[in-house]
Image (cartoon, grey):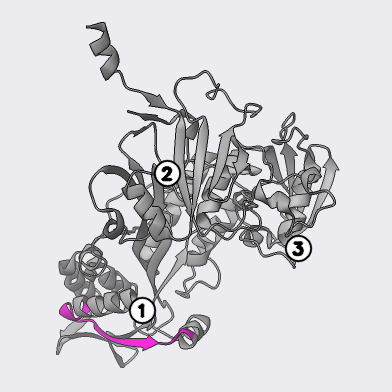
Amino acid sequence: NTTSQTEIEPQIVNDLRLGIAEFDTLNPILSNNKNVQEIGKLIYEPLVTISKDYKVEGCLATEWSIIDNNAYLIKLRENIVFHDGSKFTAKDVKFTIDKIKDENITSIYKNNLKDVINAEIIDEYTIKLFLNSSIPFFEYNLTFPILSENYYLNQDFVTTSKNQNPVGTGKYKVSAHEQEKILLKQNQNYWNNANQAENNSYGIHTISVFLYSSMGEVYNAFKIGNIDLIHTDNSNFEEYIGTLGYNKKEYKGRQYDYIALNCNSEVLSNLEVRKAISYAIDRANINSNIYNSKYYVAEFPLDYGNWIYVNQSASSGYNPEQVKTILTENQWELKNNVWQKQINYNTIRTNLNLIVNSSNEKRCLAAEDIKEQLAIVGINVTIRKVNDTQYQNYLKNKNYDMIMTGTNVGFSPNVNTYLGENNFSNYTNEELKNILLEIQNITDENLLKEKYSRIYEIYRAEVPFISLYFNKNVVCYSQNLMGDISPNNYNIFYHIENWYRQY
């Protein structure tokens, strides 16, 4: 009987198996590989990190404050050591910043620091960053990984063999780097290692990272059970790994599509027409028909899990009956299936152009669907499919009624792209302009939420643009991988130290 009970007792495995396709380098400043950047978050640490709901949290920095709008004073965490035992100080931060900004080095983190003019060491654990202007929520840019100056002493940063296993301050360190596999082990000197003692029967103690030549090989390795977790934004991933035998977590990606409505155009300067368009577009239907339900319908640029976005009222949503009501109430008449109105002795009709980039096939199909939906309610749309150069000229000159566009949303709650100066909708609102200035200096979370709630109210009332979609990201993982697996766009490995495999 005792033997029988022992046989069915689950076995705990503390090794996690991951895969990287087309590996380039483990140096996170130099790598352009998305999988390397993801795994790099386990090895290296930034000044600030981002939580699951996109709040900024201190990491290697404990405090930061804005000085004179154009400078940040940053206090660093003390008593931190790199994996090789060397001490972490402000010198390492300046070294990393200088390398990222070096014009001879290509780094995905250049954009984080494009507004930094200079980094000045104040003392061993304080550094000051000078900016070229006031940047809203600049602290969200402090998420670049910090490397050791001492480790690269007298080395060529780009070509040195030390890039095979550079040292960080993170939860895991490189233990071995072979031709087909990189082995990571728990960093026993980690400054925040409350949950990762070696004698703990749960938790990931070692990570085996297998190197593959293509993403197809990674999919196949996952399918046959050789790796435990994959992350993808490929909407057709099920064609490679099937639909059975694994768990998955889906979340909103960073690709955000919307329609900018030119508030200076003759027809769309009328608020009721903009509202009518928003009521007439069935985004869920387009998502189903064009995107095979592989996107998320978006309500606002911050509607991707950001803590500051609170949708306090239900979406106005698809309601074609409201089109007739709102236009009639504002003295528009439906004649020959097009709405018209006398304004200053001129007859204005709801004839609009919609610009779309011809190289974006899905957007072109969505534009056709939108045209049909608007035609049903008496709004006539002419689609102009233009090449890349023409499309950029339209955006630059804003000589359109409507344009289908999109952006990769940042981690910060900055909405200036959509509502600030020079937005693609030519939209201005004095109250909104003041709020966007105010929030740059507000640190109280409740007050920030109030301000953003008001921003959303203005957006809903004024309809300067119409939110469409977020793309979908997926983490697929084996059924025997246990723990709180809750990824977001910043990090797919939250609480990895508490994961484990069970058989």
- Three-letter amino acid code at the position of disc 3: Asp
The amino acid on which the numbered mark 2 sits, given as a three-letter code, is Pro
**Residue most toward the top?**
1
Which percent across, then down, holds residue 90?
Answer: 79, 42
| Comes first in the chain, label 1 or label 2 | 1
Q: Say what secondary structure mark 3 lies in.
A: loop
Residue 487: numbered disc: 2
Q: Residue at x 47, y 88 (%)?
A: 390
In the depicted structure, whether residue 392 falls above or below residue 451:
below
At 51% from the left and 86% from the top, the residue drawn is 393
User: CA separation, marks 3 and 1?
Assistant: 46 Å
Quadrant position of the N terminus in the picture:
top left
Circles 1, 2 touching at the beta carbon (< 8 Å): no
- Could you say where residue 6 lies in the image, as x and y percent from the top left? 29, 13
Residue that appears at 73% across and 42% down: 74
In the image: residue 499, left or right of residue 334: right
Rendered image: mark on residue 145? none
**Which residue matches tag 3?**
102
Q: Residue furthest bottom?
A: 346
Q: Where does the C terminus fall, quadrant-wise? A: top left
Q: Whole-percent x and y of residue 425?
A: 44, 74
The magenta span reads 374-388
> Under tag 2, what secondary structure?
loop
Q: Residues within 10 Å of mark 1 (few under 14, many from 20)?
A: many
Point out which mark residue 268 bears. Answer: 1
Q: Position of residue 392 (x, y in %)?
A: 50, 82
Q: Quadrant of residue 472?
A: bottom left
Q: Is residue 58 left or right of residue 280?
A: right
* Residue 375 on the magenta span: yes
Marks 1 and 2 sit apart, C-alpha to C-alpha, by 40 Å
